[in-house]
Image (spheres, rainbow, N blue to C red):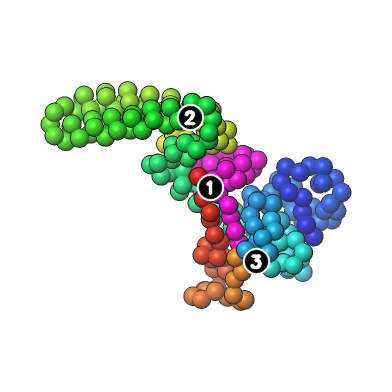
């Protein structure tokens, strides 16, 4: 049984039947449904209830052939961690550079220049050329300006999806605060997720109670 893609209310009318949806929390939706690709046949995967005799395990699988099957909750959680890690990198503002929106190139140069000046301040402090108060005041001014520039970049292009995540001091909290629609837009902007086939059975080193999920069987192709 294939569940409707998140955000697809029209198809939710007729499928899945009420008996199935009652087993699923209606609030429970899936990050990668229709976004991640099967590594074998290349089709988008959908969230599906498998092993229904054992209560059902929400799983991603490609439609017809089920070349790959992956626990949906575990993959979603892993992907959230990957996105937060990407947004935590110092070059996060570069994500917006390739948006192609008018002015984004100029904003990108502004941001680079501001970051260089911040580095310069730190170097000047290290050399004893300025004192700690000058360092702090200078840094605050530059960071405030950088935050403005990054906000403008966010508005300019692909930042539509990333707005609110850029320049935040706590990307994990910002990600947690997004609704599913926004999270899917972020994933779609940042990456292509491909689910590869795994060996049958328990992974090497598996211990009772732990998961079969292995991040190495999931490929993240960065778009930005
Ligand atoms: Zn497939």
- Look at the picture and state if 125 lies above or below 53: above
The quarter holding residue 55 reads: bottom right
> Is the residue at mark 3 in contact range of ligand 1, meaning its CB lies under 8 Å from it?
yes
Q: Name the residue that disc number 1 marks.
A: 223
Gap in angstroms between the C-alphas marked 2 and 1: 17 Å
Can you tell which quarter of the image residue 57 is in? bottom right
* Percent of width and height locating residue 167: 44, 34
Expressed as whole percent of the image width and height from the top left, the position of residue 66 reads 72, 67
Q: Earlier in the sequence, mark 2 or mark 3?
A: 3
The residue at 62%/63% (across/down) is 39
For the record, the magenta segment spans 170-195
> Hey, which residue is sitting farthest left in the picture?
128
Q: Earlier in the sequence, mark 1 or mark 3?
A: 3
CB within 8 Å, label 2 to label 1: no
SS type, badge 3: loop
- Of residues 121 and 6, the one drawn nearer to the viewer in this rendering: 121
Magenta span includes 166: no
Quarter assignment of residue 93:
top left
Name the residue rendered at 29%, 33% in the picture. Answer: 116
Residue carrying label 3: 40
The residue wearing badge 2 is 104
Q: How far apart in space, not on screen, are marks 1 and 3 (Cα)?
A: 21 Å
Residue 105 sits above or below residue 89 on the image: above
Could you tell me how far apart the alpha carbons at marks 2 and 3 are, in whole angstroms? 38 Å
Q: Is residue 9 left or right of residue 115?
A: right
Q: What is the chief secondary structure element of the magenta stretch?
A: helix
Let me know if residue 209 appears in the view: yes
Circle 1 residues within 10 Å: few <14, some 14–19, many ≥20: few
């Amino acid at each position: 049984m294939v569940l409707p893609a998140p955000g697809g209310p029209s198809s939710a009318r007729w499928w899945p039947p009420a008996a199935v949806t009652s087993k699923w929390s209606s609030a429970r939706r899936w990050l990668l449904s229709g976004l991640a690709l099967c590594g074998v046949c290349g089709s988008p995967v959908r969230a599906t209830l498998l092993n229904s005799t054992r209560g059902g395990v929400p799983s991603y699988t490609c439609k017809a052939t089920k070349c790959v099957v992956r626990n949906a909750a575990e993959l979603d959680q892993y992907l959230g961690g990957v996105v937060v890690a990407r947004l935590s990198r110092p070059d996060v503002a570069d994500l917006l550079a390739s948006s192609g929106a008018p002015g984004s190139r100029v904003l990108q140069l502004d941001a680079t220049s501001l970051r260089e000046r911040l580095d310069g301040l730190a170097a000047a402090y290290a050399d004893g050329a300025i004192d700690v108060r000058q360092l702090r005041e200078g840094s605050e001014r530059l960071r405030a300006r950088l935050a403005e520039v990054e906000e403008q970049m966010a508005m300019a292009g692909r930042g539509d999806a990333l707005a609110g995540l850029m320049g935040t001091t706590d990307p994990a909290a910002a990600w947690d605060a997004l609704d599913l629609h926004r999270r899917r837009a972020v994933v779609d902007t940042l990456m292509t997720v491909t689910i590869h086939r795994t060996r049958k059975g328990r992974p090497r080193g598996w211990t009772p109670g732990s998961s079969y999920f292995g991040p190495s069987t999931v490929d993240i192709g960065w778009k930005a």
